[in-house]
Amino acid sequence: MSRLTDLLRQVRQTDTQLARDLEAEISELTNRRTFGLVFEAHQPEAVELPGRSIRRGDKVRLLAPRGEIKAKDDRLWRVQRVERVDGQRVAHLSELDSQQPETQMASTDDLIVVAEFSDRIYPGLVETGRVERDPDKPFHTVVNAENYHALEMLTYTHRHSIDAIYIDPPYNTGAEDWKYNNNYVEADDDYRHSKWLAFMERRLKITRELLNPEDSVLIVTIDEKEYLRLGLLLEQTFPEARITMVTSAITAAATRAKTFGRSAEYIYFVQFGESAPVALELGPEWNTAKTKNKLDLYWSRLIRTGTGTARTDSPNLFYPIFISDSPKGPIFRRVGEPFYGKDRNEVTAEDGIKVVWPIRRDGSEGRWQVSPPVLRELIDNGFAKIGPWKDETTTIYYLKRGERAKVESGEFPVIGNRSDGSVITDGSQYRPRFIPTEVWRLTSHDAGNSGSRLLAKFIPRRKFPFPKSLYAVEDALRFFVEKKPAAKILDFFAGSGTTAHAVMRLNRRDNGRRQCISVTNNEVSAQEQRKLRKAGLRPGDPEWEALGICDHVTKPRVTAAITGKTPEGEPIKGDYNFTDEFPMADGFEENAAFFTLTYETPLSVRHHRAFERIAPMLWLKAGSRGRMICDLGTQGWDVAEAYAVLENFDRADEFMAELQARSDALLVYLITDDDAAFQMACRELSAHHTPVRLYESYLHNFQLNLEGTV
């Protein structure tokens, strides 16, 4: 290592960036895992930014000539300067990552900007549309972006505030269905599994910064090609989490040569903090044990069973219960006090009254489950009853807390009382709540009927490969957000938008205000790309971008789900099935806003020249509700429903007066690089106002290169 240190010192004198890169690689090698899941930390991916104008200092690639379908030149170039030649913008380029770099000139029309994941980014957002049906509700959001950079953006707007993440990542089946370093990973790539793991690990590390560590869940679906590696990766990335894998049938059976037919996928539930699935009212197909619904409450024996059953274990729970008979049946007379004597026969009762003790089957003295005062209260409320008379061992029953709750909540309506005062209930309408096993086989989870064919109703003639069953996503989330009507849910492999659709259905059930953030890119399928290239089109052309996943599938599907109309304006035919059945044409009383991620320069941000692109992020951070402040106007401040912004401190008195008239909690963004001005403004804010300093908080968040640090 001493020799390496000397060599690095020499390199640092001539090329500091190369020295830093070498140090990072050496550190990676020396800290490499020996046991467990071992894989290469491959070169980070890169994302192309079609439509971004070419600027000096940009990293770019050369686009293939129009009409050609051959592989493009993947070399990276640095734009040294841009000039205008014969009315056309021309860039002077220098090759990157080469020992003998080439230089050339190229039209900016033939270049595309590239952002590598090792680069710091300063994100912004541009709104590209919205649909609004309930102004009082918060907005769901759909972000067109490379998901790694979108996750970095969300560390500013949603750090440690996400309640659930649901993702359906690319399954790495060997088909041309996922990209790495902007190239499709082929089936015969020796490193395809390693690349897939590196691809996933980078994203999973950022989710730690987004999920609420006190109570949240990460849900990941996967098939048999990667479920083993994914399970190990999840354990290594989140050692503190509780991980359960569910097997879920998604089709009747898909035949495969020389092995068993495939009918299932796997769902990992990664739980943090106090996260736990809640018992739900589930249909009969969830009841794999085929047990019948009970029409009556479950009455437990009052005598203690199991461990600690002897009188000597709890002497204060050994006491007599006095009962008598009547023409209508036995009745409670009174509950005695704890008996500490040696001979229980010393306790006598008047004529016609019998004494019952906690005597076990072997004749030994046991103990009751509850104390005398508690039993008296249970009897008064009808929650204790007498079994058939035997002798002093007559069985006494009582309702435990969970069963009492069913009566108190009205799930089991009381229709009368027995002679002993115990409640008689009607359970004919009762639907049990329970947590299922880790094997799910439900008709509603079929990916054909509830996925592909259902999607076709919302966006006819627009294809998307293997969409999830709407009801399968809804069910997976419901176990964790049923009791969280304002939950924030993220899907950063959003695809066709099934997760957002499922969240809207969950909201309709209980009038919830849950929000879904959906992130997907605008990638065009490999097959469609070949057709478009033959037609002379390239990324960035409107005709090309119109066929990308986000614009062609995700946004239209979310819009159609809310409005109840197809992109062509026709009412959607058919009804939702299984649970919460209603016409799809009814839509949802929900709102959605659509954005595209932008890449800003820190200088433009610091000088308040990027406010229009930063503004949507401030709105997201404030809860994605109400009006978005996009322009501060001539007064230099504004106050919306969820947040406020001050840039002109000469008008601070007016701004503060407006804030004082509001009693609700607000985020207050103060745009200043003057620490004294910021502190003075903070002193004037009320306790329910939360100050955020711009652009210091924004720049500090993104000056940390998240690659390898999150």
Image (cartoon, grey):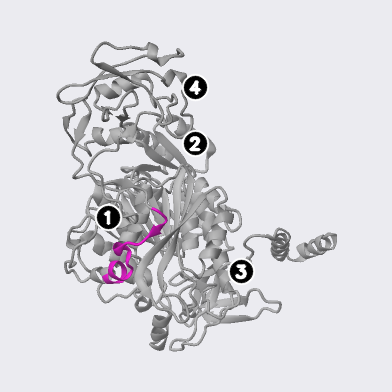
Query: How many labels, in total?
Result: 4
Look at the numbered disc 3 and give the secondary structure of its residue: loop
Residue found 44% across the figure and 45% down from its top: 275
Q: CA distance from mark 2 to mark 4?
A: 72 Å
Q: CA distance from mark 1 to mark 3?
A: 50 Å
User: Which one is nearer the viewer's eye here, 456 or 330?
Assistant: 330
Q: Is tag 4's residue or tag 1's residue first in the polypeptide sequence?
A: 1
Q: Looking at the image, is mark 3 or mark 4 nearer the viewer?
A: 4
Q: Looking at the image, is mark 2 or mark 1 nearer the viewer?
A: 1
Q: CA distance from mark 4 to mark 1?
A: 45 Å
Work out whether residue 302 can be spotted: yes
The residue under label 1 is 284
The residue under label 3 is 43
The residue under label 4 is 312
Q: Are marks 3 and 2 in contact (CB under 8 Å)?
A: no
x and y percentages locating residue 623 in the rendered image: 36, 46
Amino acid type, callout 1: Pro
Amino acid type, callout 2: Ala
Q: Mark 3 packing: few (<14 Cα in 10 Å), some, or many (20+)? A: some
Amino acid type, callout 4: Thr
Q: Is tag 3's residue or tag 4's residue first in the polypeptide sequence?
A: 3
Residue 650, above or below 141: above
Q: Mark 2 packing: few (<14 Cα in 10 Å), some, or many (20+)? A: few
User: Which one is nearer the viewer's eye here, 281 or 701?
Assistant: 281
Q: Looking at the image, is mark 3 or mark 2 nearer the viewer?
A: 3
Q: Is tag 2's residue or tag 1's residue first in the polypeptide sequence?
A: 1
x and y percentages locating residue 52 in the rendered image: 45, 69
Magenta highlight range? 437-453
Q: Is tag 1's residue or tag 3's residue first in the polypeptide sequence?
A: 3
The residue under label 2 is 677
Q: Looking at the image, is mark 1 or mark 3 nearer the viewer?
A: 1
Q: CA distance from mark 3 to mark 2?
A: 44 Å
